[in-house]
Amino acid sequence: MSNGDTADLQQSLIARANHIADEYRQHGQQRRDEILSESAARRHLREEHEVLAAKAAAERAYRQAIQAAELRGRGELDHLRWTLVQSVLTQLDERAAKAAADEKAYLPLLAQLIAAGAQALPAAAIVVQLNARDLSRLKDRWGEFSRALAPGKQLALDAEPIDCSGGALLRDDADRMRVNQTFEGRRQRLADELARMVMEQLFADQRLHG
């Protein structure tokens, strides 16, 4: 091989090496650009995830705050309802105790309670139960006291007293049906009704001022 051929071969090898080096550089540059692009895309995706996570956390915190406020509101309404009902019932207890101590004012009220209870019972023979104080008041004059209370029905006075502050408990002779006209029984029914009425009024006021 002549010197010229050797020089040509060297030039060819050098050119080939340079070409390969250029290809590697281009490939490396492309790969670098791809890596940078992928990195930027991942960073952007990560940032989007972080933003979405932050929004979700904020929405959860907002919902929890709203729920807590609603619970506090319901708690305040329940407390207000309880306070109003208890206030009315306390006044009722005071009036009932005062009325029961005044025989002249109390006996007409007791008669009304017994008459209403007897009317609610379908039985013809009805047993009336009173507390010890009222039993002592009426046992010797029961016939006169009860004669006009329930026309067409027979009202018998139970000799055993019951535990109540006033009023009467009525039952049929077989003790299958009862009507609770004691102060305590009527107080409980009134408490339920008052609670319902107070809640309706509270919500009505909320709608008017909402």
Image: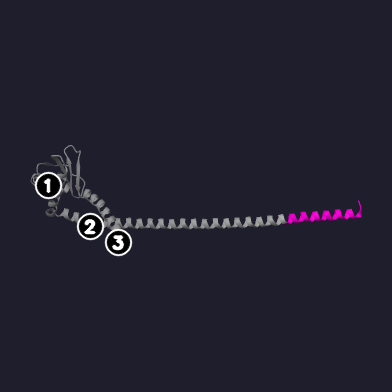
Give the x, y percent position of residue 196. 27, 53
Label 2 to label 1: alpha-carbon separation:
27 Å
The quarter of the picture where residue 142 lies is: top left
The residue that mark 3 highlights is 208
The quarter of the picture where residue 87 lies is: bottom left
Residue at the extreme right of the image, as rendered: 2
Give the residue type that dot 1 points to. Answer: Leu
Closer mark to the observer between disc 3 and disc 2: 3
Residue neighbourhood size for the residue with mark 2, other residues' Cα within 10 Å, grouped as few (<14), some (14–19), many (≥20): few
Query: Magenta stretch?
Result: 1-25
Residue neighbourhood size for the residue with mark 3, other residues' Cα within 10 Å, grouped as few (<14), some (14–19), many (≥20): few
Which sits earlier in the primary sequence, circle 3 or circle 1?
1
Which sits earlier in the primary sequence, circle 2 or circle 1?
2
Which sits earlier in the primary sequence, circle 3 or circle 2?
2
Give the x, y percent position of residue 147. 8, 45
The residue that mark 1 highlights is 138
Closer mark to the observer between disc 3 and disc 1: 3
Give the residue type that dot 3 points to. Answer: Leu
